[in-house]
Amino acid sequence: MDAIKMLKQQHREVAKLFKEFETAKADAPREKIFIQIADALAIHAAIEERHFYPAVKEEQTEELLLESVEEHLEVKRIIADLLDMEAEDEEFEAKMKVLQENVEHHVEEEETDLFPKVEKLFDAGALEEIGAAMAETEEELRSEGNPRDAIPSETDAAAPL
Ligand SMILES: [Fe+2]
C-alpha cells in the first residue's frame, strides 16, 4: 500500500470519528468514540514518526517534518489530558474540540504541503516500501491492544526525526 494513500485514509477515518463524536449526545458513547480516536491517533503518530518521517527526511522536507513532530506532541498532550478525564467532566467537550482543531490543522498541512513535496521526491516503489513497513507496525500495535496507552509517556518532547 502506498504510504501516502494509507495516511490519507487514516486522516479520513479520524475525521469521521470526530463527526460521530459531535453527533453523539450521551457521555457513554462519547467516551467510547474518544477511545477510538485516541487509539487511531496513537497508531497514526507512531507509524509516521517511526517510518514515514525518517524515510522522507530531505533538505526540502525537514522544516515541515520538524513542525509535524511538534504538532504531534501538542496532540499527544491533549490526548493524555483527556485520558485522565471522564466524558461527564466539564472540560471534556472543550478539550475534545481543541484536539479536533489541532488534528484538522495538522492534516491540512500534511495534505497540502508535506505530501505533495514527498510525492515529487519519491517514486511509487519507495512509497510502497514505506507503506509496507507502516502497515506492519500498525498490525503490531493493534495486536498488542490499547495503542493509546503509550501516549502519556510521549508528552515530554517531540519524536526525533
Ligand atoms: Fe501526522
Image (spheres, rainbow, N blue to C red):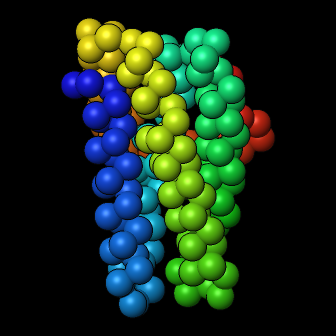
Residue that appears at 62% across and 68% down: 98
Judge from the rendering whether residue 68 lies leftward or rightward of residue 155; answer left or right: left
User: Residue 142 is drawn in which quadrant?
Assistant: top left
Q: Is residue 160 above or below residue 45?
A: above
Q: Position of residue 124 (x, y in %)?
A: 27, 14
Question: Which quadrant of the rendered structure holds the C terminus?
Answer: top right
Q: Is residue 82 above or below residue 116?
A: below
Q: Residue furthest right?
A: 156
User: Residue 14 is drawn in which quadrant?
Assistant: bottom left
Q: Position of residue 93 (x, y in %)?
A: 57, 80
Q: Residue furthest left?
A: 1
Pick the residue in front: 53 or 153.
Answer: 53
Judge from the rendering whether residue 41 lies leftward or rightward of residue 76; answer left or right: left
Residue that appears at 51% across and 32% down: 114
Residue that appears at 35% across and 65% down: 17
Judge from the rendering whether residue 75 lies leftward or rightward of residue 132; answer left or right: right
Q: Position of residue 94 (x, y in %)?
A: 63, 79
Residue that appears at 67% across and 81% down: 91
